[in-house]
Structure formats: C-alpha cells, structure tokens
Image: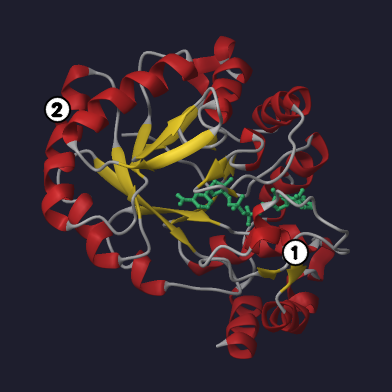
Amino acid sequence: MTDLGKLGFGTWAMGGPYTFGGEPVGWGPADDAESRKALRRAFELGVTLFDTADSYGCGHAETLVGQAFADVRDQVVIATKWGFTFDAATRRMTGSDGSVGHLRRAVEGSLRRLGTDRIDLYQLHLGDLGLDEAALLRDECERLVTEGKIRSYGWSTDDPERARFFTQLEHGVAAQADINVLFDNPGMYTGEYAVLCRRPLAMGLLARETFDVLPPDDVRVTNPAWLRFFVDGRPSPEYFAAREAVRDVLTSGGRTLVQGALAWFWARSPRLVPIPGVRTVAQAEENAAALEFGPLTPEQLAQVESVLR
Ligand SMILES: NC(=O)c1ccc[n+]([C@@H]2O[C@H](COP(=O)([O-])OP(=O)(O)OC[C@H]3O[C@@H](n4cnc5c(N)ncnc54)[C@H](OP(=O)(O)O)[C@@H]3O)[C@@H](O)[C@H]2O)c1
C-alpha cells in the first residue's frame, strides 16, 4: 500500500502562469531552477510525498517534478490529478472532461511528463462530478492499477459522500480536501481513507508575516469565486483575525506560524496529510522542519478549537 507519510509538498505555484476562461489561475511567475532545488531540498529533509496535477501550468509542474526526482524515483511518492483539459502550447486550460476516454489519455500524458512508468496516487480533479460518472472512473482506475500504470487513486473533493464512494474498492485510498486550522471540514476524515489537505497554509495567510503587493496574475489577486482567504490580494479580514486569535498557541514552543499551522493537522487526526505549496528552498526548509516539532499537544489543540469553533 502507498505510504503517504505525514507531510507532502504541493506544486501548484511551481507551474507558473496559465489561464482558464481568460482569467489567470496560476500564482504569478515561477523560477524553475528554484522550484527544482526546493523539491530536492524537501527530499533531502525527509519529505517524500509530492502533489501535482496535469493542469498546473498546463503540464509544467509535472515536468518539474519528473526532472527533480528522476534519479530517486523509487524513493518518492508522486500524487497527480486528471480531469481538466488544457493546451500546453498556449498555457490555457480549455475545460473539463470526466469521461473514461479522457482518463486514459490523461494518464499517458502525466506518465510522459513525469518521466515515470507509474503514478503512485492518481486523483480525480473534478470535485463535483456526478457519482454515475465517478463509478465508471473508479472501475477504470482499478484497471489502471492492474495494468501497473497507477498504484492507487483518490478524489479531490470537499464532499465526504463522494470521498467515501471513490474509496470503496481496493486501491481507492485517499481524498484531497480544503482543510486547515482556520477552515476545518471534519466530515471528510471520518472514513477509512487518508486525506491530503490542500491549502493547509490558507494560501499563505498562515505563513506570511507581511503581505506585499502580489503580481496581477496571482490567483490570490484575481478573486475567483472559491477564493476565501484573500480578497484583491490582501488577507481576508475575517480569516486574518482568526489567525491572530490563535497565533500565540500555534507559535508556542519555538514553532514558527507555518510550523504551528502544520502541527495542528497531526494533532487533529492521524488521517490528515497536509500538503503545503512551496516555491523556494527557504520555504521547503521551514515547512519540513515542522516535522521535528511534531503535533500540537492535546491541550494546545483544545485551546485552538475553543477559540475558533
Ligand atoms: N483542487 C485541488 O485539487 C487543489 C486546489 C488547491 C491546492 N491543491 C494542492 O494543494 C497544495 C497546497 O495548496 P496551496 O498551494 O493552494 O496553498 P497553501 O499550501 O495553503 O499555501 C501555499 C503558499 O504559501 C506560501 N508559503 C508556503 N510556505 C511558506 C513559508 N514557509 N513561508 C512563507 N510563505 C510560505 C507560498 O506562497 P507565496 O510564496 O506566494 O507567499 C505558497 O505558494 C497545492 O500546491 C496543490 O498541490 C489542490
């Protein structure tokens, strides 16, 4: 069975700029050399799970992950996603496709960009897809396991029913959901599956001390409908106030705010695997060092929960 460990790193921002429906959906410019160094530093520090998607930078993030780990492929766990369509040449996402035919095409594309013969965790990226279509994809994923192209699969969805449905067969092992100390979704982690927690740092709100002007093509600036932690590139006042209310508990014992935010997951449930997005070596080092501090104590967790919920 795929061992996901306690911490993984996300690679959305490493994909660089790309658009969907004319709107930027990346995190502004990315520095490829720094991205590869950050991934490699994470590995040296004991982080082995890396989350990406075929759509991040229209294939670019997968390419970087493949390059960074080409010589240590067997020692890392690569999680990627399928479901959106895109044009790599123009860096435009073009739509979504929940068909079995697209799954078959997508897996070959990801294997090629990642430079590998198998994907360790393959995740359905379309969070709201109907269960009838998902049932066909689930069966096809079992076939892909038998063929050796993937090792396991899961669904990136915030809906516990969908997550349970997709993990009913033998190799369905994980969901991926928006969960962090400021925005919990406990319904997602009552099942038998692991949960990769996306946006664990509230897209940087739980990491940054100062908020400079973000580039205009950063998704935190463009205000997509689902964005909750930032408004016009500034922290949402509501979530910023919540962060300040728990700052002292999270940073007790010498942890930085990031390290406290990650420690919350490990105290909350053994099923949770935060996957903070990183772009730089410095971020990789700070985030990986959270492992040394371990979980918040039960008392610290209770304090956080009593303040926020
Ligand atoms: N639908 C989906 O399936 C889905 C959706 C969202 C995310 N994801 C996955 O989940 C991963 C994590 O989510 P996310 O990247 O959206 O949000 P996140 O992990 O909450 O925040 C990541 C951002 O926080 C900042 N950061 C990280 N470590 C830092 C540090 N030590 N110090 C200062 N700033 C730091 C960086 O942004 P700056 O450097 O720009 O401040 C980084 O890009 C993604 O990379 C992706 O793999 C999946």
Residue 254 or residue 103, whichever sits in front: 103
In the drawing, does residue 212 fall left or right of residue 225?
Answer: right
Instruction: Report, in whole angstroms, how far the alpha carbon at label 1 lies from the one at label 2.
Output: 43 Å
Q: Is residue 305 above or below residue 110?
A: below
Q: Residue at x 29, y 34 (%)?
A: 152
- As shown in the figure, which amino acid type bears the numbered disc 2? Arg
Q: Which residue is mark 1?
A: 233
Residue 9 pos. (x, y %) = 60, 41
User: Dot 1: within a 10 Å radius of its alpha carbon, few (fewer than 14), some, or many (20 or more) residues?
Assistant: some
Regarding mark 2 in the picture, which secondary structure is present there? helix
Q: Is residue 52 visible?
A: no
Q: Is residue 309 above or below residue 270?
A: below
Q: Residue at x 79, y 34 (%)?
A: 281
Q: Which mark is residue 211?
A: none
Residue 158 pos. (x, y %) = 37, 64
Residue 247 or residue 112, whichever sits in front: 112
- As shown in the figure, which amino acid type bears the numbered disc 1? Gly
User: Dot 2: within a 10 Å radius of its alpha carbon, few (fewer than 14), some, or many (20 or more) residues?
Assistant: few
Q: Residue at x 43, y 35 (%)?
A: 80
Regarding mark 1 in the picture, which secondary structure is present there? loop
- Point out the frontmost of discs 1 and 2: 1
Residue 105 pos. (x, y %) = 28, 23
Q: Quadrant of the C terminus?
A: bottom right
- Outermost residue toward the front in this view: 22
Q: Residue at x 16, y 22 (%)?
A: 146
Quarter assignment of residue 212: bottom right
Residue 90 or residue 230, whichever sits in front: 90
Q: Quadrant of the N terminus?
A: top left
Quarter assignment of residue 280: top right
Q: Which residue is mark 2?
A: 143
